[in-house]
Image (cartoon, rainbow, N blue to C red):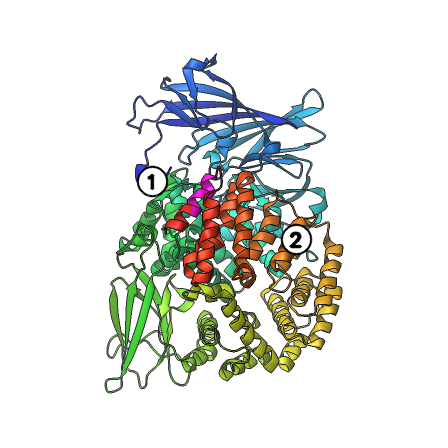
Amino acid sequence: QTIYLSDYRVPAYLVDTVDLRFELFEDGARVHSTLELRRNPESDEASAPLELDGDSLTLESVALDGIELVASDYEDRGDQLVIRTVPDQFRLTVVTWIEPQNNTRLEGLYKSSGMFCTQCEAEGFRCITFFPDRPDIMARFRTRIEASKAAYPILLSNGNDVEKGELENGRHFVTWEDPFPKPCYLFALVAGDLVERRDSFTTCSGRHIDLRMYVEPRNAEKCDHAMDSLKRSMRWDEEVYGREYDLDIFMIVAVDDFNMGAMENKGLNIFNSSCVLASQETATDLAFQRIEAIVAHEYFHNWSGNRVTCRDWFQLSLKEGFTVFRDSQFSADMGSPTVKRIEDVTLLRTAQFAEDGGPMAHPVRPASYMEISNFYTLTIYEKGAEVVRMIHTLLGPEMFRKGSDLYFQRHDGQAVTTDDFVRAMEDASGRDLRQFRLWYEQAGTPVLTVSDEFDAGKGIYRLTIEQSIPATPGQSNKKPQHIPFALGLLGQDGQPLPLQLEDRAPEAPAERVLELTEAVHTFEFHGLESSPVPSLLRHFSAPVRVRYPWTREQLLFLMSHDPDGFNRWDAGQRLAVDVIQSLVGAADDAEVEPRLVEAYRKLVTDAQLDQALVAKMLQLPSEAYLIELAEDADVPAIHRARETVMQSLARALKDELKACYQRNLETGPYEVTPETIARRSLRNTALAWLLMINDPEGRALAESQLNDADNMTDRMGALRALVNSDFEEDRRQALDQFYGGFRDDPQVVEQWFSVQAASDRAGQLADIRKLLEHPAFDWKNPNKIRSVVGAFAGQNLSAFHNPDGSGYDFLADQVCRLDDTNPQIAARLVTPLTRWRKFAPVYSGQMESALERIRDKDGLSRDVYEVVHKSLAG
Ligand code: ARG
Ligand code: ZN
């Protein structure tokens, strides 16, 4: 059941062309597939049978070179169609019948709000027709779609539309041709009654590209932001990576039922509605930024993923890590680089570090898997992006660009490996990245233990850095990795000091990237008058944990003096973590470190500082992050300690918060820029804190903001603040009023669900059960499931970790219920239980039982099986 990287063999047969004809009906679809195949000259399996993958298909007929095969000529094993003897080169025609209307897994061809759409990555194409479903088979596709013209006026597939016409019985057809050979996971088809929004883009070489978005009519006014984001992405990829778009048409389709965020199908990207549709009235700033990033991500895949693709799914990070790195560079360029870095690192340290320290830990290039859908992980995506970022840091921007140019040129049209990527970087730059490759092979988050001493007599500051990598499932005794470690030193006066590595070096920089390659290194910095304060791992130059015995004094100092914005924020986070941790288990009225309060007072009142950074610095470390840092975590106790700090900050800074609120009241029209986002964020943080202490003035501000806001960020900010206050009456009323205003908008209703499900006040288990009964809830819609069940188990941590175990039981029930209809989503929902060993015994025992209950369900899917078994074993 486990698939190993070491078992990789080149395919025995290649497919040159795929000719598809879809007959779409209400009770099913008939798929005619004609493949031109030939024996792979590079394969040594001379007499291998032809094996085609299939899943949930009804086979109607098979013909070889036009001659219908009889049952004895082939074997239909259900998940494989095997033909023992075939010529060296031949044409195979396969007809299958499928039922998109009953496809609740949302893999392959399925229906979402009346339209047909597809999701083929990773292995969904085999749910459409029998095919060698692996990414190293690249073929040219021609696709004819036939359907009722009234119900499905729009018929789309990859490439260019080359033919269309009328058929009998009110049916019509369109034929699409994609000139670029591609793996079948990039195939897409859409049929529906959609409106089209058009725009255009002229490429750097003067080619004219038609840009088209297809959405349901009610969403026609929500396309502008995605379209603008697309044009910015196209320009940026030309300027920064020299990548020009290659087809004449680029299409985006929005669908409501979608397992993931979006999909980069060649020329026809398909998006989860929540990741593409936006308007000022219905989408928050966060959603606007997310959409820009995802549109960019899918667009960038056209080169990093489609033109150059993956040899096999172990190489997934080849395209995902690189593309996440590219989209994060893009977002940094479009907004505030420091803020973007803070957001990325927050996700990484909270969720990816947790994954890397748990039973599902795997290398960026895994060595084995059972179900590939489970490997679309934070490690593949986010850690993968950090690995590419480190290459960028080690090579510098010019050499990195040379490397990416070489990579695209050398491998255009090929299916390759992460190793090929690194080799291109090496060949272009002349750098040796042999040891660096361990980042792809070894799982686990390296820990850097830093110690220092100052030799006053010699004026030397000595920094010792020791690295160790914890054992992970199936991997112990790891080798030291090649780690770029950026740092600076600050003098007592707060000024940056020159970093003189040797005695009497003339010109020394104020920041250096040290390269760690051994288990222990000691660095000496010369010419210092007094002991400096170190600013370690600037910009988070590597995805590692840093242990250093900071004093609160040093953290406060770095918070106001570090020239690296990221490390300023990080110092604030470390200080807040230290203060909260010291209060875990303490009395509710325990005193909160007065220096933290004063530091926050400075932040709230200082209108001169970069407000975007201030807005981030004011966010206390999340419960999830505090749990990640804890051992034997007692979630309710952590929750209380954090609340104590937040409430005492709010009480001490009440007047300052009100002034901050007023100072950041918007006057001009709504726009999405780093400055205005920061203002809204500050204003809404102030509001949230005031309501945490049930301040009547804050309550009045929230009520009027809820009514008068001209945008969703402020409206949601007010709603969230009220929901998380103790004003029960107001909470109920605010929720009802909000729902009444937006009940027809699924994306807003999802936000309305999750603001409740994530709240310790409005989202206790009994409330969650009511939400599941709500008429707007839909078990077939992954977004709704995520916004209630996912938000409860992933964000409402004190309610989920109720010591009576009810939260775990509830989650186990929902996983079992979804396992039959949508195993991909079911497997995702298990995540909060997988780290059961991290929690104090009262919790971990019950989490383990919940996992065992899921394990014992009849007919458990492979998706959930893998996660549950590894969790219980690891
Ligand atoms: N390649 C897509 C993206 O990251 C993700 C698709 C994953 N789909 C899945 N069913 N696992 O852009
Ligand atoms: Zn991607």
Q: Which is nearer the eye, 134 or 832? A: 832
Q: Are marks 2 and 1 in contact (CB under 8 Å)?
A: no
Please identify the dominant SS of the magenta region.
Answer: helix
Range covered by the magenta-colored residues: 861-868
For the residue marked with disc 1, what is the amino acid? Tyr
Q: Which residue is mark 1?
A: 4
Residue 203, position in %: x, y?
A: 54, 46
Which mark sits nearer the N-terminus, 2 or 1?
1
The relative height of residue 620 versus residue 381 in the rendered view (above or below) is below
The relative height of residue 245 versus residue 100 in the rendered view (above or below) is below
Residue 603 seen in the figure: yes
Tell me where residue 207 sits by quadrant. top right
Q: Is residue 439 left or right of residue 732?
A: left
Residue 463, position in %: x, y?
A: 29, 74
Q: Which is nearer the eye, 616 or 576? A: 576
Q: Which residue is mark 2?
A: 771
Quadrant assignment for the N terminus: top left
